[in-house]
Image: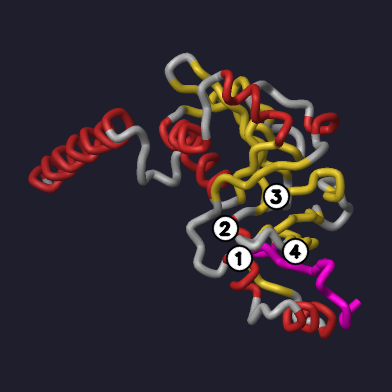
Amino acid sequence: METFLRRLKFYGIGFGIGLIFVIFFFKNRGCSWLPDNRVKNSILERVLVVPETQVAELKKKGFQQKEIIAFLNDGEVNFGGSIKSQPDRVYLIEKEGKELYFSLPEDSFISGVYSEKPDLSKIRKGKGKAIRFPNEEHFFYADTTDMVECKLNELGLKNADSLYSIAKQNLILDYDQSVFNKVVKPVHRILLISEQKDTIACDATWYKNKINVTNIYSSKLKNCQ
C-alpha cells in the first residue's frame, strides 16, 4: 500500500508539472477543454468574416488578414470584457496591449471580427469578406430538392463541393439580405465570386457544423426559376 501511494504521489507531481508546461509554456495549445480554447475553437469552426465597416479601423490597429488569425490563435480571452449572456455572444481577445472582438451568433456559421465592442443590432449592414474557413474538406452541402439540383446542373456545378471551391476563392456575406434572429435559425445570403467574376448568390443555414445551401440565385439561370 505504501508503495502504491508513493507511486501515486510521483504520478501526481509529474502530471502537475506537465500541466504547467502545457498551460504556461505552450499557451494552451492542444487543450480543447480549457475555456480559452473552447471559445477559440468555436470561432475557428465557423467562417471568419471582416465587415466592410471594420476594414479601415482594423488597418489602423495594424491588423491585416494574417495578423487577425495569428492574434486569435495566440491571444487570451478576456471573459470579463466579453458578452456571454445574449444569443449573439461577443468575445474579447487580448494580446500585448491590443484587443479584438469576435462575434459568435447563435446557430450561425459566421463569426465577425471587430476593432471595438460592437452593438450587433445596429452594425449588421453592407457586406463582409470571408478571410478564413474551417479546415473541413466537405464544408458545404446542398438541399436535395429538385429546384436546387436543377440550378446546380444548369450552372455546370457537380455538387456542393463545387460551390465550396468557389467560396474559398471569394465569399462575401450580404448582411442586408441575411436574417440573424430568425425564429428557427439564421439564414445568411452569401455571394460566391469565381475567378471569372461570376457571382452566385446562395441562401444558407448552419446545420451539424456544415453550411447547408437552401437556394441558389444567378443571372445565368434561365430554366430553373
Q: Type of residue at label 2?
A: Lys
How many residues crowd around disc 4 within 10 Å: few (fewer than 14), some, or many (20 or more)? Answer: many
Q: Type of residue at label 4?
A: Ile
- Could you say which quadrant of the image residue 17 lies in? top left
For marks 4 and 1, give the one nearer the viewer: 4
- Mark 1 to mark 2 CA distance (whole Å): 6 Å
- Mark 3 to mark 1 CA distance (whole Å): 13 Å
What segment is highlighted magenta in the picture?
A: 207-225
Q: Type of residue at label 3?
A: Ile
Look at mark 3 in the image and give the residue it sits on.
Answer: 172
Q: Type of residue at label 1?
A: Tyr
Which quadrant: the C terminus?
bottom right
Q: Are marks 1 and 2 in contact (CB under 8 Å)?
A: yes
- Could you say which quadrant of the image residue 26 lies in? top left
In the rendered structure, find residue 200 and report the number of the disc placed on it. Answer: 4
- Mark 2 to mark 3 CA distance (whole Å): 10 Å
Q: In front here: 159 or 197?
A: 197
Look at mark 2 in the image and give the residue it sits on.
Answer: 168
Q: Is residue 179 left or right of residue 40?
A: right
The colour mode here is: secondary structure
Mark yes or no: residue 165 visible.
yes
- Mark 2 to mark 4 CA distance (whole Å): 13 Å
Percent of width and height locating residue 163? 65, 68
Look at mark 1 in the image and give the residue it sits on.
Answer: 164
Membership of 213 in magenta stretch:
yes
